[in-house]
Image: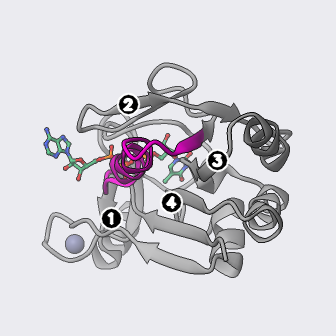
Amino acid sequence: MAKLYFYYASMNAGKSTNLLQADFNYRERGMATMLFTAAVDDRFAAGTIASRIGLSAPATMFDSGTDLAACALARHVETPLACVLVDEAQFLTAAQVDQLAALADRVGIPVLAYGLRTDFRGALFEGSARLLALADSLVEIKSVCECGRKATMNLRVDAEGRPVAEGRQTEIGGNDRYVALCRRHFSAALQAKA
Ligand SMILES: Nc1ncnc2c1ncn2[C@@H]1O[C@H](COP(=O)(O)OP(=O)(O)O)[C@@H](O)[C@H]1O
Ligand SMILES: Cc1cn([C@H]2C[C@H](O)[C@@H](COP(=O)(O)O)O2)c(=O)[nH]c1=O
Ligand SMILES: [Zn+2]
């Protein structure tokens, strides 16, 4: 039975690297894959999954109106897909996660979704909440805080490096705008600001 996997982590943990390695692994064995990434995340070239380690690959972009299962099925009838891989899965809607679950259950294509668990306030993203609820397999990709503990939270910082506690949930950025921290240091940074 094909499964829906959710690989979750804080920022800068290696999610995109992991995805690109998994993709390569399928393709080097002659199996076809389909990659998706969020259109809103335009840090690198649009429609590209890029890791800080230097790997990259083209991907189909999704926004909240994309039917990912329909896109994958259209590709699947031409070239049977061994796997669908989704980066920035926190930006999926709950309905899109349901589509991905159906792709695994009804069509038999494994789906590997990679994304953040929580936002800069420590709240779940819509896509992540649904993935945590539905995925057959939850896999944490671990990274370390400056203190050596596991970094599970994402602190948003402004241009001067000061913690940000208010704002829109979606704000695209990299290591200049976010710092992955353990819960203790995340809370301390926000309390020091208050
Ligand atoms: N030159 C490098 N060599 C090895 N690891 C690197 C290098 N550059 C960045 N990294 C590591 O890659 C990870 C970030 O990978 P990435 O896939 O971009 O993360 P994510 O998608 O989770 O934000 C970090 O752990 C960082 O330390
Ligand atoms: C915490 C947080 C993150 N984002 C954005 C910032 C980046 O563009 C992506 C995550 O990037 P990654 O390196 O692939 O993990 O998500 C956001 O919009 N809101 C947030 O609260
Ligand atoms: Zn810490």
Q: Are marks 4 and 2 in contact (CB under 8 Å)?
A: no
The mark nearer the N terminus, 4 or 2, is: 2
Closest to the camera, between mark 4 and mark 3, is 3
* Marks 4 and 3, how far apart at CA: 25 Å
Image region (quadrant) for ligand 3? bottom left
Asked whether 191 or 43 is in front, the reply is 43
Image side of residue 35 versus residue 14, left or right: right
Q: Which amino acid lies under the numbered mark 1 shown in the image of this protein?
A: Ala
Type of amino acid under label 4: Leu
* Dot placed on the residue nearer the N-terminal end, 1 or 2: 2
Whole-angstrom CA distance, mark 2 to mark 3, is: 20 Å
Measured in 3D between alpha carbons, the distance from the residue under mark 4 to the one under mark 2, in whole angstroms, is 19 Å
Say if mark 1 contacts mark 3, CB within 8 Å: no
Residue 147 picture location, percent across and down: 13, 71
| Residues marked 1 and 2 touching at CB (< 8 Å) | no
Circle 2 sits on which residue? 56
The dot on residue 189 is 1
Q: What is the spatial separation of the Cα atoms under label 1 and label 4, in whole angstroms? A: 20 Å
Write down the region rendered in magenta.
Answer: 12-35
Above or below 3: residue 20: above
Q: Mark 2 packing: few (<14 Cα in 10 Å), some, or many (20+)?
A: some
Q: Which residue is mark 4?
A: 116
CB contact under 8 Å: marks 4 and 3: no
Q: Which residue is mark 3?
A: 81
* In this view, 12 is above or below 1: above
| Contact (Cβ within 8 Å) of mark 1 with mark 4 | no
Please identify the quarter of the rendering in which residue 51 is found: top left
